[in-house]
Structure formats: C-alpha cells, structure tokens
Image (cartoon, rainbow, N blue to C red):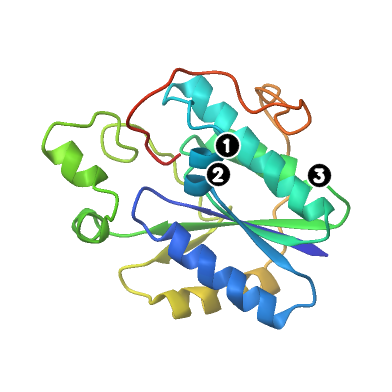
Amino acid sequence: MRRAIWITGVPASGKSALGEQLVASMRKVGPLPCALVDANAVRKQFWPHLGLSPEDRVVNVTGIAELAGVFIRAGNEVVIACIAPDREVRNRALGMVRVSAQNVAAYQVHVMAPLEVLKGRDQTGLYRAYDEGRLVGLTGVDAPYEPPSPEEALYIDTSKLSVADSVREVLTYVTRIQPHNWPMTGSEPACRILGSGAGPSRGSTRSVLLPI
C-alpha cells in the first residue's frame, strides 16, 4: 500500500517544513522511496503564469494532484504540501491521487497556528504586504480558506508542536487510521495537465503570486 499525504493550511502554517521532514523520515523507514510535491516550488517552476482566480486555483490544484500521481505510478510514496483553499476542490484532488494507481492510501493533514505566529514566521512577506496594503487576496485573511473536517484530517497546531513531534504525529496517524475513501466528486477536473503535453494555460501573468 503506497501512501499519499496531503498537508494543507494557510500561508506560513508550516506545510513545507513538515513536508520536508516527513519525507526524510519516510525515506529512512522505507520500504518505498518518497517524493515531496511542494506547491510553492511547483507553481514557480511549471506554471508561474497562473493567477488567483477560482479557475486558476482549480487548475493549479489539479496539476499538483496530477504530478503526485506521476510520482506514485513511478513507485513512490508522496507528500504534498499545498494550501488548496477550496475544500471540495482539495477533496477531489485527493480522489485523483487515490485512484492514480492501485493500492494508494490517501491521507490529509491540516496544519494551523495563531495569526500572530503566522506573521512572525512568514518568510515570504505576505502578511506584511497585506498589513501595509500592498496585497489583496491573502488566503485565510481576506480570501477564503476552507479547512478539512476533523473526520477528514489530522489537525496539528504547529505553534505547540515542533516539526519533529509533528512528523511523529503524522506517522502514527497514517499507521493507525483507516484511509478516507476520497471520491472524485463535483465537476470534472479543469484539465488533465501532465497528460496534455503542456502546462496549465488559464490565467494571466502577475508579478506577485500567492502560494496556493
């Protein structure tokens, strides 16, 4: 059974830090290799032209799910660090990951922290830009973020747990909890990105991009 773990949360909640250490731990334990799909890096490298419209966000999350599926079909387990603020879109993406190959167990982890903690650890300057009036549409502040339900995800407060402790919580969770049967509900995915021979084409170019 190959595992896919989707880490969601607002900007600066600790997704990338947890994802990196979780992948390192999973690689040590084995028996399968493990890949990290970090939405920040993927977005900048493969489709930086996408904007922040609801349509572009769907295309981005769909692309992240497609990429995760490529790693899974290549024999890897995968950790995905991606906000994916719309719950239905995120759940549908998890369904895509689950059916990307046989015997895939897909889990969700929701990381969170108080706003002041988020501002204090923000390395990208998003919260400062918002406070100074230079940014509009910050996910979880003036743009919506829909967290998973407690039945759908492991909740981790990264202001209270270290990264190492959070990794242990996740590994315990995926060992003890029956994986959720994520359905591919709602409308069809916006595009089949990696199977089309080209990256996402929707959206306009922007000089400032938020992590999605």
Q: Distance between the residues labelled 3 and 2?
A: 21 Å
Q: Is residue 112 left or right of residue 5?
A: left
Instruction: Say which amino acid is labelled 1.
Output: Phe
For the point 70% across and 82% down, the residue is: 29
Crowdedness of circle 2 by 10 Å Cα count: few (<14), some, many (20+)? Answer: some
Seen from the viewer's position, the closer of residues 154 and 20 is 20
In this figure, which residue is indicated by the disc labeled 2?
42
For the image, the number of numbered tags is 3
The earlier-in-sequence mark between 3 and 1 is 1
For the point 45% across and 58% down, the residue is: 15
In the depicted structure, whether residue 162 falls above or below residue 205 = below
Tell me, yes or no, whether the two marked residues, 2 and 1, touch with CB atoms within 8 Å. yes
The picture quadrant where one finds residue 24 is bottom right
Instruction: Say which amino acid is labelled 3.
Output: Val
Residue 148 visible somewhere in the drawing: no
In this figure, which residue is indicated by the disc labeled 1?
46
Question: Picture coordinates of residue 32 (x, y %)?
Answer: 79, 71
Crowdedness of circle 3 by 10 Å Cα count: few (<14), some, many (20+)? Answer: some
In this figure, which residue is indicated by the disc labeled 3?
99
Q: How far apart are marks 3 and 1 (CA)?
A: 23 Å
Instruction: Say which amino acid is labelled 2.
Output: Val
Q: Is residue 176 left or right of residue 132?
A: right
In the depicted structure, whether residue 70 falls above or below residue 104 = above
The picture quadrant where one finds residue 207 is top left
